[in-house]
């Protein structure tokens, strides 16, 4: 389906959706967590449980995208999910019960996953054939949402009320929802495309390695994504924790576009391996060195890689033409995120440093799986369509190398 409007309009709307659904709706919890510890009586264990509830919801949303693919193509689902996110954020200050907080974070996770899958699928569909940096800037919307939520918390430092922080996050989500309200989801497949047969190389073994790598990344990255601010705040001045979170978001905004440009020179498996190694170093830094400088460097390395890793993994899955690859990879990622907080919960009694070290080790394991992905990866995959004679010209176009979210056809 051809778009008649500027592709940058689609980029801006998708970026706003991802900023609302992921950057604020999901990750506002990270800078608010220390306030809930000190003001709302939330224990470290309960904090991990709230994160887990959100990630369970994320898994449910991702599985819904797999089992009910029509959801991914529904504007009503996108809009409803953004409204659910706004409402659950606004309701968090209305209770002091950990069970009630978990009950709110669960549907918020479902909504976040649906927003992500709808927006990512929309980018894959509507920006196919456009320059690779365009979808990269859209995915960078997650970083913009993180930076905005961090700046919001810094602006509210004079108030330092956990309830005000949640209400302000809800207001920001509502504002971003308005900006993404008219985002066009992926179009439904045409009758001709459903009747069209295709053949492609068997890609199960590469997709399996990619799935394992991305699932392990979900475990490691979410530990840092949940506890980084609290970990930095333990040994640094009060502003450094939230300041580092703002830096994570700012580094994340351009990172997908930058990784896309690197894709002109190196293949996705190589870039995925490099990004995972860099991220592991960034996660480990606050635990190994400590201090303000290490905290800020850690924020840049983490922010500069986690969205790039997601983009590279989803684009590799799309290139392999594995059925429903976006939803499947998102599901594996969310399983990893569910496992992450409970896995490190026993280590939180003496602070967050041991948890960060374990997360770094898991991300290195994800890098090892990405290294396996490099072996014989089908960079020049061609899909041959079998169509009726009058569509021979389109059939020739379909036989070109597959384009994905990042990089030209040579590196796919």
Image (cartoon, rainbow, N blue to C red):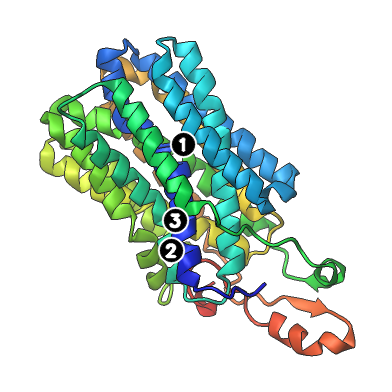
Name the element at disc 3: helix
Above or below — where is 356 with respect to 365? above
Going by the image, does 313 lie left or right of 394? left
Q: Which residue is drawn at 67% across and 45% down?
A: 65
Q: Residue at x 38, y 66 (%)?
A: 257
**Residue 198 lies in quadrant:** bottom right
What is the CA distance from the residue labelled 1 to the residue labelled 2? 23 Å
What quarter of the picture does the N terminus occupy? bottom right
Going by the image, does 5 lie left or right of 399? left
Residue under label 2, please give it: 136
Q: Which residue is drawn at 19% across and 36% down?
A: 155
- Sequence-first tag of 1 and 2: 2
What quarter of the picture does the C terminus occupy? bottom right
In the foreground, 138 or 411: 138
In the foreground, 45 or 61: 61
Give the label on residue 312, or none.
none
Give the label on residue 219, or none.
1
Does the rendering let one see residue 322?
Answer: yes
Q: Where in the figure is residue 312, as x and y percent of width and height?
A: 48, 60
Above or below — where is 28 with respect to 160? below
**Mark 2 surroundings within 10 Å by alpha-carbon count, few (fewer than 14), some (14 through 19), many (20 or more):** many
In the foreground, 230 or 131: 131
Above or below — where is 337 with respect to 266? above
Does the rendering let one see residue 371?
Answer: no
- Sequence-first tag of 1 and 3: 3
Give the label on residue 15, or none.
3
Q: Which label sits in the foreground, 1 or 2? A: 2
Dots 1, 2 in contact, CB < 8 A:
no
What is the CA distance from the residue labelled 1 to the residue labelled 3? 25 Å
- Sequence-first tag of 2 and 3: 3
Q: Which residue is drawn at 29% across and 32% down?
A: 31
Q: Where in the figure is residue 157, as x and y percent of width and height?
A: 17, 29
């Amino acid at each position: 389906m051809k778009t008649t409007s500027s592709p940058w309009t689609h980029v801006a709307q998708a970026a706003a959706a991802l900023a609302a659904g992921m950057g604020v709706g999901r990750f506002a919890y990270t800078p608010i967590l220390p306030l809930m510890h000190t003001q709302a009586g939330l224990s470290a264990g309960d904090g991990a449980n709230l994160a887990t509830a959100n990630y369970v919801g994320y898994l449910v949303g991702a599985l819904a995208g797999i089992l009910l693919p029509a959801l991914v193509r529904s504007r009503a689902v996108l809009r409803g999910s953004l409204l659910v996110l706004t409402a659950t954020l606004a309701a968090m200050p209305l209770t002091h019960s950990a069970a009630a907080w978990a009950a709110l974070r669960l549907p918020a996770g479902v909504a976040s996953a649906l927003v992500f899958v709808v927006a990512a699928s929309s980018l894959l569909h509507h920006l196919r054939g456009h320059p690779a940096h365009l979808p990269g800037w859209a995915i960078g919307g997650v970083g913009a949402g993180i930076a905005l939520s961090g700046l919001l918390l810094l602006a509210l430092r004079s108030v330092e009320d956990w309830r005000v922080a949640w209400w302000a996050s809800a207001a920001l989500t509502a504002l971003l929802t308005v900006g993404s309200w008219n985002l066009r989801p992926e179009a439904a497949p045409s009758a001709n495309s459903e009747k069209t047969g295709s053949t492609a190389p068997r890609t199960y073994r590469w997709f399996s390695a990619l799935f394992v790598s991305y699932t392990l990344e979900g475990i490691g990255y979410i530990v840092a994504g949940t506890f980084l601010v609290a970990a930095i705040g333990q040994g640094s001045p009060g502003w450094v924790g939230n300041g580092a979170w703002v830096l994570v978001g700012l580094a994340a905004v351009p990172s997908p576009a930058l990784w896309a440009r690197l894709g002109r020179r190196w293949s996705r498996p190589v870039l995925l391996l490099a990004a995972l190694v860099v991220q592991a170093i960034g996660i480990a830094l606050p635990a190994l060195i400590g201090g303000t400088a290490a905290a800020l460097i850690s924020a840049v390395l983490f922010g500069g890689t986690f969205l790039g890793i997601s983009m590279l993994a989803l684009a590799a899955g799309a290139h392999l033409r594995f059925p429903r690859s976006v939803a499947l990879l998102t599901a594996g990622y969310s399983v990893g995120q569910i496992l992450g907080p409970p896995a490190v919960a026993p280590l939180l009694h003496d602070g967050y440093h041991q948890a960060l070290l374990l997360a770094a080790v898991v991300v290195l394991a994800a890098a090892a799986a990405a290294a396996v992905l490099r072996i014989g990866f089908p960079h020049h995959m061609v899909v041959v369509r079998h169509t009726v004679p009058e569509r021979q010209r389109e059939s020739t176009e379909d036989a070109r190398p597959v384009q994905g979210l990042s990089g030209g056809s040579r590196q796919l």
